[in-house]
């Protein structure tokens, strides 16, 4: 059954987020041959419209307004509601990001719609669209279907493969004028903690440090390795609690859930709460002095050794490769 | 005088819970029922705000009769009043139906004492959705502020709240009109030890319990399983990790092996 599916594209710090491309891919599956329309909402974001087409959207609807410079529930609801009213989609896909998590339940309730959040896979089975999502803090998975009304979906970053970028694709880009007013909550200021670097939840490579890193200084070699690999630095709660790094880096049950292609755990013992945040990474490498460390049970490749020897060596080797290639 | 209502849920403790291999649902016998940890922080914050500005803290839950225990836990933490909605008609509710029932109960509470602020947890550790808070806000038509990790100021006279909202890489300072709804992060506070008088009060406490019939203007079609447009078709657990390959040799040799492994999988992460 062909469906019209809307996705919300997110622009942050001047570029589209990867999860927005993944949302388009999920939307394609849900559409079953129907149209995928991307909503591009913000202040001066029009320039990104074509990229969304290259990534698989059939059409883009742009809503621009100075009041949309920062995300607010009211502002973005008004913008997206206007797009929904115009397009009448049968499903709407968001990234499972701070924005998507805030906006999707609010709009779903407004439209009396079912919402399936934090989806890691979408498939079509016997005429139903079936969503897979983790439950019980990642201990199990459930498959869900929406039986009635518009389907609201949020997709977890890094789980659904985005489509091949194709510059030969074309599609229409329309602007929709929406009055954005009466904002009940306004953003006074945005404070970024990790000014540089890659967003953890979207990083393809994560080099994570634990208490074994021993000091804030000890994170340096990890940062260098992450840098040559184009990845981000993460941490266990042990490292955060010890004050070696900021809590915004914490991965695990009470931190971020990440699913990079490559996860390198350095000096992390592998407590169950840490595993809850990273065990679905595609390739896990563990470096730990203790051969009995629990982390080796989930690692695809383990190195028993001192991280302060292994990590700098690895960085060196990768640097050499970069020079040669 | 602020009136703050925290929405709380009793959940199986998923940290220790075992999954029943036949049904793939939580084996409830293996897991004690606890107050959802995020909701403990919601109650704690409400109590702290009460101490700062004066007021009353109520807690509300929807759940089966044993959920009274979770309310008692909140009384220990310093809540003043407990409300519970419990009825077979609510059973099987998904987040849409849950937010509907809770919003109806909140309207009823507000009739007795107008509500300035509603605080929910970030999410529950069993359902993991985090949808109920924003859903309630929408139904009551008040602004939702998700991911709150600090309350800077509540000003009832001037009708505003200023909070920090957590972002993936920092936070933003947001000013909202009152009444509004927060969902709070764990780092917003540390749970205080319950003082003895609270524990004594809690042990004897009975909340106000309402059934679906006690709520005014309820559309029964929107309750429970009937009001739930999403259904679960299957639950399963991921296969047990088997542990991988240990690289052997000198440090240099191990690094070299790892290097070629990573290079082999390069296409994975260099797109
Ligand atoms: C409710 C709750 C929620 C939690 N949530 C989280 C969470 O979200 N995320 C999280 O990570 N934790 C969480 N924890 C904490 C978790 O239980 C562990 O305490 C924590 O993950 C341990 O951190 P760690 O592995 O860095 O430290 P440790 O367990 O101390 O491990 C340090 C490791 O470093 C190794 N090591 C030391 N020196 C070296 C060296 N030179 N080279 C190589 N290896 C070395 C040691 O062998 C050891 O294995 C939570 C706990 C609770 C109770
Ligand atoms: C008779 C009966 C049986 C039930 N059986 C089940 C069951 O078997 N499994 C199950 O998962 N749920 C059950 N529920 C509860 C209900 O279905 C869930 O609360 C609902 O789906 C919320 O989803 P969530 O856990 O993902 O909440 P989230 O959206 O993750 O929760 C976010 C926040 O919303 C608030 N909140 C959520 N649920 C409630 C609630 N019930 N009461 C008050 N505040 C709440 C809390 O502040 C929480 O931190 C039952 C309820 C009743 C009445």
Image: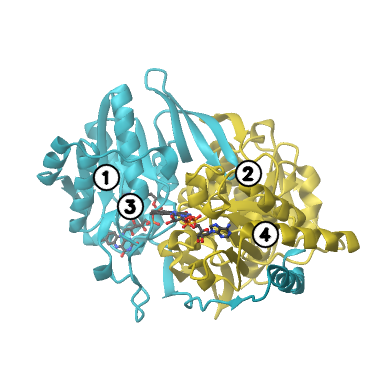
Chain colours: A yellow, B cyan
> What residue occupies the far left of the structure in this picture?
B204
**Label 4 residue SS:** helix
Chain holding disc 2: A
Identify the residue at horizontal 52%, vertical 49% (top origin): A239
* Residue A23's disc number: none
Which image quadrant for residue B139?
top left
As drawn, A85 above or below B112:
below
Q: How far apart, in angstroms, are the residues tagged by discs 2 and 3?
A: 37 Å
Chain holding disc 1: B
Residue closer to the observer: B161 or B106? B161
Query: Which residue position is annotated with label 1?
Result: B60
Query: Which residue position is annotated with label 3?
Result: B36
Residue A169 visible in the shown view: no
Residue A280: x and y in percent read 56, 67
On screen, residue B207 versus residue B148, left or right, reads left
Q: Nearer the viewer, mark 2 or mark 3?
A: 2
Residue B75: x and y in percent read 20, 41
On screen, residue A59 versus residue B42, left or right, reads right
Which image quadrant for residue B110?
top left
Q: How far apart, in angstroms, are the residues tagged by discs 4 and 1?
A: 54 Å
**Label 3 residue SS:** loop
Q: First in sequence, mark 3 or 1: give its number.
A: 3
Discs 3 and 1 lie in a common subunit: yes
Identify the residue at horizontal 65%, vertical 36% (top origin): A68
As drawn, A89 above or below B144:
below
Mark 1: C-beta under 8 Å from nearest atom of ligand 2: yes
* Residue A309's disc number: 4
Discs 3 and 4 lie in a common subunit: no
Q: Nearer the viewer, mark 3 or mark 1?
A: 3
On screen, residue A173 versus residue B156, left or right, reads right
Query: Which residue position is annotated with label 2?
Result: A217
């Amino acid at each position: 059954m062909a469906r019209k599916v809307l996705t919300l594209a997110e622009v942050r710090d001047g570029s589209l987020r990867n999860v927005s491309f993944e949302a388009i891919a999920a939307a394609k599956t849900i559409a079953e041959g129907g149209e995928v329309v991307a909503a591009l909402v913000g202040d001066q974001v029009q320039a990104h419209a074509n990229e969304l087409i290259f990534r698989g959207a059939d059409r883009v609807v742009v809503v621009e307004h100075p009041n949309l410079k920062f995300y607010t529930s009211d502002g973005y609801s008004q913008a997206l509601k206007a797009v929904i009213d115009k397009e009448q989609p049968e499903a709407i896909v968001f990234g499972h990001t701070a924005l998507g998590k805030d906006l999707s339940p609010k709009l779903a309730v407004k439209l009396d719609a079912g919402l399936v959040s934090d989806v890691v896979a979408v498939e079509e089975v016997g005429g139903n669209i079936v969503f897979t999502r983790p439950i019980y803090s990642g201990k199990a998975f459930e498959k869900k279907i929406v039986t009635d009304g518009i389907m609201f979906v949020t997709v977890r970053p890094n789980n659904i493969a985005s489509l091949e970028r194709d510059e030969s694709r074309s599609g229409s880009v329309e602007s929709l004028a929406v009055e954005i007013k009466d904002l009940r909550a306004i953003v006074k200021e945005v404070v970024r903690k990790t000014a540089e670097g890659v967003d953890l939840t979207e990083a393809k490579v994560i080099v994570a440090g634990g208490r074994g890193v021993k000091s804030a200084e000890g994170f340096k070699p990890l940062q260098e390795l992450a840098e040559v690999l184009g990845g981000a630095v993460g941490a266990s709660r042990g490292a955060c609690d010890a004050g070696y790094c900021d809590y915004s880096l914490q991965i695990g049950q009470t931190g971020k859930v990440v699913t990079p292609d490559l996860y390198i755990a350095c000096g992390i013992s592998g407590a169950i709460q840490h595993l809850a945040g990273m065990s679905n990474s595609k390739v896990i490498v563990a470096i730990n002095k203790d051969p009995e460390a629990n982390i080796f049970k989930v690692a695809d490749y383990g190195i028993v050794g001192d991280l302060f020897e292994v990590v700098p060596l690895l960085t060196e080797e990768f640097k050499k490769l970069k020079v040669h290639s | 005088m602020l009136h703050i209502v925290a929405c709380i849920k009793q959940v199986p403790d998923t940290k220790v819970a075992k999954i029943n291999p036949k049904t793939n649902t939580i084996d409830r016998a293996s897991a004690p029922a606890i107050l959802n940890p995020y909701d403990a922080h919601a109650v704690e914050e409400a109590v702290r705000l009460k101490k700062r500005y004066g007021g009353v803290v109520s807690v509300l839950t929807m759940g089966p009769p044993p959920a009274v225990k979770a309310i008692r836990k909140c009384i220990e933490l310093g809540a003043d009043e407990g409300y519970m909605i419990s009825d077979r008609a609510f059973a099987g509710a998904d987040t849409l139906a849950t937010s509907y029932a809770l919003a109806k109960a909140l309207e009823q509470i507000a009739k007795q004492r107008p509500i300035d602020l509603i605080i929910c947890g970030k999410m529950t550790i069993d359902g993991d959705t985090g949808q109920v808070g924003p859903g309630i806000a929408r139904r009551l038509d008040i602004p939702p502020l998700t991911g709150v990790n600090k309350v800077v100021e509540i000003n009832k006279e001037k009708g505003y709240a200023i909070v920090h909202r957590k972002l993936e890489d920092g936070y933003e300072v947001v000013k909202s009109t009152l009444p509004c709804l927060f969902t709070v992060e764990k780092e917003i506070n540390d749970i205080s030890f319950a003082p003895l008088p609270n524990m004594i009060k809690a042990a004897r406490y009975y909340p106000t319990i309402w059934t679906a019939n006690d709520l005014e203007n309820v559309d029964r079609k929107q309750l429970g399983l009937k009001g739930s447009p999403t259904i679960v078709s299957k639950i399963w657990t991921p296969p047990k990790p088997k542990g991988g390959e240990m690289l052997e040799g000198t440090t240099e040799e191990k690094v070299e092996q790892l290097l070629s492994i990573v290079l082999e999988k390069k296409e994975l992460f260099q797109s």
